[in-house]
Image (cartoon, rainbow, N blue to C red):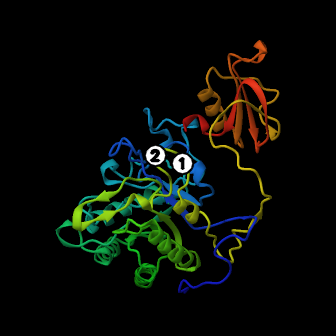
Amino acid sequence: TGSGSGSGPQTAPPGQTPCSTKRGVGLNPDTWSDASNPGFLCGDLTSLGSLNWWYDWGAVDIHGWGGDKYSCPGNKGPPGFIPILRKHEYTTAEALPEFESDVILGFNEPNHKSQDNISPEWTATEWIKIQARYPDKTLVSPCAAPCGGSGCNGGNTKDWFTSFFGNCTELGGCRVDYLATHIYTCDADYTMTFLQDLYDTYGLKIWLTEFSCPFERDVEKIKAYMASVIPMLEAADFVDKYAWFASRFSTQDYGAGWLLSGENSLLKENVAEKTSLGDLYMSFSTPDSPDCAYVTTPPTTPQPATCQDDKDYTDGEGLNWPTWLTAGTLEECDAQCAGWEGCTHFSWVGPTHADTGLRNSCWLKKGASATKDVSGTVSGPLGCSSL
């Protein structure tokens, strides 16, 4: 059911916050391919705004991977993280961790030799063990994707899925709750035809965990594809979730065979701020959804995303008073905010503050916005010390 035409508003009315029960993002972990344009910054998800879910092509939340580039305040990102199984990390189903998430994504592009590169037969055998390991989790299928020529393991998308489910039947049946796939095209109608065909064939609603507009450098043409396809995805009953590729990445130019321009990025280079494409992506809403009621928001003066020197918040809900929190650095105060339920902003009283009794203290708040001048105090939203 659902051709993608739908009814109801596709973008939020003026003064109302967009709400989607489907929208997610792939948070690109690549900080090594192009040192001048790292794929990941700690403040990326905060700058994007409200997402239903997100992933990072790994089993662990990227905000706590460790090292200089993956140690974020609280070592944990916003709610919505969903782990994905990867062949290079996988040993046995029994050795898999107790994931916090209620949902687990299957292997990434199993039919691509350059990705997880696993046969339908091997995957079905392991899936029986995986479903036994996680009897109460929602399981999203391995993500077979369009593939051609000698670079494939198990054939194209439907070749791999058909073989996988066939092997599952011989083994007594695999529990798969949703079907994951990728599609790269600038044709919205073709995107929906591809997804509808998978749904009609296997009877499972779709998680489209990667999609964007390849072989195109003109951001206006990329926007045109996004503006056309996302309302279709939002309205289609057979699409459960989607995630654009990607948060931020450098252009992939492999000659005539592949070009994916960095203009598809939702975030700007070297700063946790949305591109114009990112603004567009975050503007869509799920139509007529009982789980996604609009929230009317009064117009506000945008607050800086960065920490502000010599400023102290004058509003918001104080969270830790009268508990006295100490913090020797701005980063320590930011981390305490990340670990305190409901904290959105903080003020750190530094070692130069006029009141020696207040120095090196940390004050946590929820929903702060207005500030006043206070020398020696630094204030900002959660995560600002990492920007």
Task: Tell which of 163 and 54 is nearer to you.
Answer: 54
Q: Residue 348 falls in which quadrant of the image?
A: top right
- Residue beneath label 1, please? 44
Give the residue type at disc 2. Phe
- Give the residue at x 31% y 77%: 166
Give the residue type at disc 1. Asp
Apparent side of residue 298 relative to residue 115 in the rendered image (left or right): right
- Residue beneath label 2, please? 40
Apparent side of residue 100 relative to residue 360 in the rendered image (left or right): left
Task: Tell which of 220 and 128 is nearer to you.
Answer: 220
Task: Tell which of 357 and 313 is nearer to you.
Answer: 313
Q: Secondary structure at mark 2?
A: loop
> Which numbered dot is residue 10?
none
Apparent side of residue 132 relative to residue 11 in the rendered image (left or right): left
Q: Secondary structure at mark 1?
A: helix
Q: Residue 291 falls in which quadrant of the image?
A: bottom right
Residues at marks 1 and 2 touching, judged by CB atoms closer than 8 Å: yes
Q: Is residue 102 visible?
A: yes
